[in-house]
């Protein structure tokens, strides 16, 4: 009986050691991600990228680090790199509506890929049907593509959900004589 107890104790200690090391890695990745975010908001984008790279190296399944690195690459006008990172973030976490939204922004604002942007905004809306910003941005993309009715529908939905930017955009469009009715 004592030999079985001794073997079970050794196995338990090994498992606990393995789990502790795993938790340390996760905490280290989170610390690098947090430092990267701090650098991002300080506009030290190159240092932010280094921190996100390290977080991903430690934990390759850390979707938030990919998403944050994508935002940073977008700020550096590395649209392809940003889209790749947002894509990896949603591959790891398919419910990451912010990465769909941010990938849509990169496609719309940097690449003028309105169709791709609309797909990403639609996916974010599928995840959260009350995501006013996604309706607003999708409305702008549809309007830019010539889908006036679709764009206005989305802008009005964004207003209904409380998005002030959509309201200001509609007011400015009206003041400038642009089509603002279905």
Image (spheres, rainbow, N blue to C red):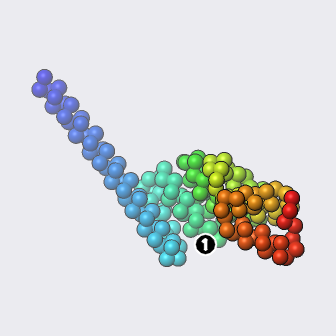
Find residue 105 and report its image quarter.
Answer: bottom right
Q: What residue is shown at x 20% (from left), y 36% (from top)?
A: 10
Find residue 133 and report its image quarter.
Answer: bottom right
> Is residue 25 in view?
yes
- Residue 50 left/right relative to 25: right
- Residue 166 left/right relative to 13: right
Residue highlighted by disc 1: 76
- Viewer-proximal residue among 106 and 15: 106
Residue 170, compared with residue 21, is above or below; it is: below
- Picture coordinates of residue 52, whole percent (x, y): 48, 63
- Viewer-proximal residue among 17 and 178: 178
Q: What residue is shown at x 58% (from left), y 65% (from top)?
A: 71
- Picture coordinates of residue 165, whole percent (x, y): 69, 69
**Mark 1: which secondary structure?**
loop
- Picture coordinates of residue 127, whole percent (x, y): 62, 48
- Viewer-proximal residue among 101 and 49: 101
């Amino acid at each position: 009986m004592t030999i079985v107890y001794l073997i079970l104790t050794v196995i338990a200690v090994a498992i606990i050691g393995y789990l502790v090391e795993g938790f340390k890695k996760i905490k280290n990745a989170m610390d690098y991600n947090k430092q990267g975010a701090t650098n991002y908001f300080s506009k030290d984008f190159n240092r932010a990228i280094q921190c996100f790279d390290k977080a991903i190296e430690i934990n390759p399944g850390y979707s938030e680090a990919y998403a944050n690195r994508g935002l940073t690459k977008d700020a550096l006008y590395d649209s392809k790199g940003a889209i790749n990172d947002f894509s990896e973030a949603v591959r790891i976490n398919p419910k990451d509506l912010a990465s769909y939204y941010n990938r849509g922004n990169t496609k719309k604002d940097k690449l003028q890929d309105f169709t791709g942007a609309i797909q990403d905004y639609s996916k974010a809306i599928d995840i959260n049907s009350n995501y006013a910003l996604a309706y607003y941005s999708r409305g702008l993309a549809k309007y830019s593509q010539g889908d006036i009715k679709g764009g206005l529908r989305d802008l009005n939905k964004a207003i209904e959900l409380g998005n002030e930017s959509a309201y200001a955009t509609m007011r400015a469009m009206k003041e400038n004589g642009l089509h603002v009715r279905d």
